[in-house]
Amino acid sequence: MKLRSTGLSRKMKMKEFFTKVKKFNFIYYILLAVVVLFSYHQLLGMYFWRDDYTGLYLGQLANLSTHPGFAYPYHLALLLERYARQFFGLNASYYFLTVIILYVIASWLLFYFLKRLVSNLLIAFFSTLVFAAGFVGQDAMKMTMGDGLGTILALDILLAGLVTFLIYLQNGKKVWLVSSLIAFALTLEITPQRTGSSLLIFLALDWIISWKRKSQELIIRNVLFLLVFLIQYFLHPSVLLLGYKVNPPTQFWGLLVNLSPLYILNFLGTFWNMIIPTPLQEQFNASLGTSGQSLTLIKFWLTGLPTIFLAVTLFIYLKFLRPAIYSAITLGKIITAVVLFSLLWAMAIHQITIDKGDLVAIFNGGMWLIFLIVWIVLGIPKSKLLSLFSLLAIFGILAIFFITIPERVLVSYNRYLLLPSFTVALLPIIFITKEFYQKELRKRRLAQILLLAVVGILVLPRLIFAYTTQREFRQDYSQHAKRMYQNLHSFIPRINQPTIIYLEGVTKQLQFTVGDAARVGYFGSEVAYAVHYQTQKENIILPQTAGEIPGLLKKNPNLSYQDVYTFIYDKDGLRDTSSITRQLLAGPNQPISVAIDSWKEELSSNDLKVFQFTPTSSIWTLLPLEVKIPLKFSSQSKEKEMEMSWEYNTSGLITEDKFVKVKLLTDNLWHEYKFIIPAGGEYLQKVSFNFPTDTSVEIGTTQLDYLLDN
């Protein structure tokens, strides 16, 4: 009996365990984690870029307070970066793995928040998919400092604050209110410039849920959150505790003085960029020819056709969901109003002189906003207030986000959207109609299909472009960046004094991009090199062209030729050309003579005579060459034009034009002509002159001089 009762007891415990597991709904959390990993797994093959190097560099300094301009408002993120570097070194995959894990946690927190908010597991799950699918903030997720590690951590804490605040509003236990206030303060502490707008989320959530309850307690809570916001923004207590001498940033007063209607345009464009992936927009706009300078009104209006089509389709769908609300005539009026508004909206803004892509996004965002407002008014969802809360959250967080950074007026920065990107997950809630909860099967199915369709429209492009854009970045940039720095260490093991480094071909192979801070994120960046060598950036001197090297040596008399390193980077990796460059710098500047008979007439056509010179010995072009060529030229015309071109053995490493056009005197007298062959390869492979066929030409002894002076 004892054994039998023990067996039954064990079965009861197992049943209780599986019941608890079922209640936990762990399968949804696993699915969300899988979607996040699919969206961002390619980050594990990325390498540092842009502001990453600023964070890594400041993280290696002994005293961050000596660099207040960089440290605030990312001082806590930089402290995290310092500790991360101690554990991870320069293994970029560990940093990005941390970011991915934090993003998974954020998706779980958002799912739990929406589940408690709408009291429906499936709605919460499908809405959270919009956030988990990624794409929004793709650039930010490619970086670890500030934009990545700091911001995603702030997002986790913000969502934790929203969860604890919602729990408090539902059960009234003040410990949850205190937890939410602490989380809000920490969110502002980590990335204040990008999280200030979250104040509106807390206030709106409180008003939506508590507006029929005790008004006095509601006002008190609002004041508490507002006080936390003001203290964090204008007093910066952590700055004082950590020793940063930073005055309250004056740009935050933009909350008071920059309440301009132009900001409406700003967050409208940003909102649309959060919904539809930018590459997809760019492809459609390019097909219409709106990317050029000639942006006509009709072309501009056509860019909004996808939005108009989607809005009209959803309005027609609403007719089947709720036929009693409006007639076919009412439906026609709504569609007509949407189209007319789009025309008026296009005429109002299409001539604004800002980036065309941003302008088109602003246009679409305005139309989509009007559609959402009409949908909410007509939709009468189970909780109309929840839909209004969604709109307040989405547009409020964007509006305040940009108002706190006034210099970003009229620019829709998609890469800054990692923080507010979770608000897009609230969009499907707007399309929850009362039919979703009704017992009538047909209407309930129509409402469910509508919700899934909206989620699909938002999720699928995100998954596709998250995958493709990251793959492209990994292949075009990251693999080259990692290999280049590894190769560089094999040639220059350490740097502890000022050193001149020049790499030819990096621009083409790596397609570098300048980051926010001056010269922090591309391969002309002293900071990037300093990070890899754990040295001061003052020890890194990076000329933009090889022709600057002689001038840099004159400006830095303590440097010798041995402190100069030059390399060529191509598909085979890094090749050291330092010894050749040093010989050119140290050797006498003797011109290279090209005899008269070295020029061969290789090709002729009806219009041109082509003379070519192919060097029999190496003429190095790691430094620019000045060409002096005597020509005796005669023609019936008073003036003719000659084209001179050249080729390097490392063809394609530079982007400069490889030819010049020279006007020739046709008086049948000797004249010396000069032009420059810029540095750009390893050695000169061929020089060609193209002359008109109706001319008589003689070429004298040509001289090529290395330009050793800047």
Image (cartoon, rainbow, N blue to C red):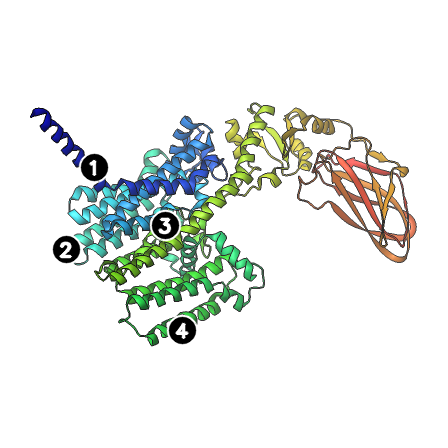
Local packing at callout 2 (Cα closer than 10 Å; few below 14, some 14-19, many 20+) is: few
Q: Which residue is mark 4?
A: 336
Q: Quadrant of residue 28?
A: top left
Of residues 133 and 621, the one drawn nearer to the viewer in this rendering = 133
Q: Disc 3 on helix, strand or loop?
A: helix
| Of labels 2 and 4, the one closer to you | 4
Q: Position of residue 645 (x, y in %)?
A: 77, 45
CA–CA distance between discs 2 and 1?
40 Å
Of residues 639 and 506, the one drawn nearer to the viewer in this rendering = 506
Q: Which residue is mark 3?
A: 130
Q: Position of residue 163 (x, y in %)?
A: 25, 45
Q: Which numbered disc covers residue 561?
A: none
Mark 2 / mark 1, whichever is N-terminal: 1
Contact? badges 2 and 3 (CB < 8 Å): no
CA–CA distance between discs 2 and 3?
35 Å
Mark 2 / mark 4, whichever is N-terminal: 2
